[in-house]
Image (cartoon, rainbow, N blue to C red):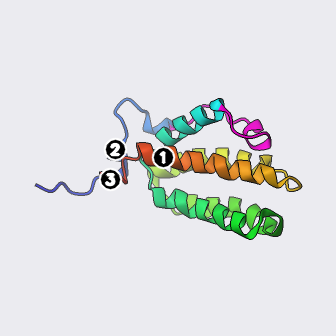
Amino acid sequence: MNRPHQHFNSRRGNNQNRDNIKFDVPFKPEWIKQGANNEMVQFCDKLGKFLETTSSSRLRNIYGEVTRIRLKKFEDSKTDFYLLKPKIAYTIGRLKGDEKKIFKELSTILYQAIDSVDENNPKTFDNFQKFFEAILAYHKFYSKKDNK
């Protein structure tokens, strides 16, 4: 028997307080400024797990813009890079309920990562792109919405 599509809220664990959805692992700007380390990988793993009930298409839309910036060369696409924050805000504005709360937590982290990119050092943009890619990889691994 086919079950009707479940609403997002019904996927949250019973032990999680839906009114207080928080990701409390601190982001470290050094992951963007200096590059990946094991601590960053563990952070992305936890964040991917935290994002498990969200749609990968929303994340991939934002990441797609990061990829376009990389392909056009960061030095030539700084305006597009600075417009990532409004793109993230727009994505959040279209969401509702728990998914909106989860994306707000993600946006706090992504904003910190964006702010850690040094416009005079393209390597920091590369580190940002790899950081975001690691989040996507772990999200795909844990995803409940896309892996039915």
Position in image of residue 100 (x %, y %): 51, 52
Marks 2 and 3: CB-CB under 8 Å? Answer: no
Left or right of 73? Residue 63 is left
Q: Is residue 26 magenta?
A: yes
Q: Are marks 1 and 2 in contact (CB under 8 Å)?
A: no
Whether residue 107 is visible: no
Mark 1: which amino acid?
Answer: His
Residue sitting at the far left: 1
Residue 21, horizontal then vertical, whole percent: 51, 38
Image height of 56 relative to 139, above or below:
below
Secondary structure state at the residue bearing disc 2: helix
Could you tell me how far apart the alpha carbons at marks 1 and 2 are, in whole angstroms? 15 Å
Q: Closest to the observer: 67 or 22?
A: 67
Of 80 and 134, the residue lying toward us: 134
Q: Residues within 10 Å of mark 1 (few under 14, many from 20)?
A: many
Q: Amino acid at mark 2?
A: Arg
- Secondary structure at badge 3 equals loop
- Residue 7 tag number: 3
Q: Residue at (61%, 31%) from the top-left corner?
A: 25
Q: Is residue 70 above or below residue 112?
A: below
Mark 2, residue position? 11
Q: Position of residue 97 (x, y in %)?
A: 45, 51
Secondary element type, mark 1 = helix
Span of residues in magenta: 21-37
The kind of residue on which mark 3 rests is His
Q: Is residue 44 visible?
A: yes
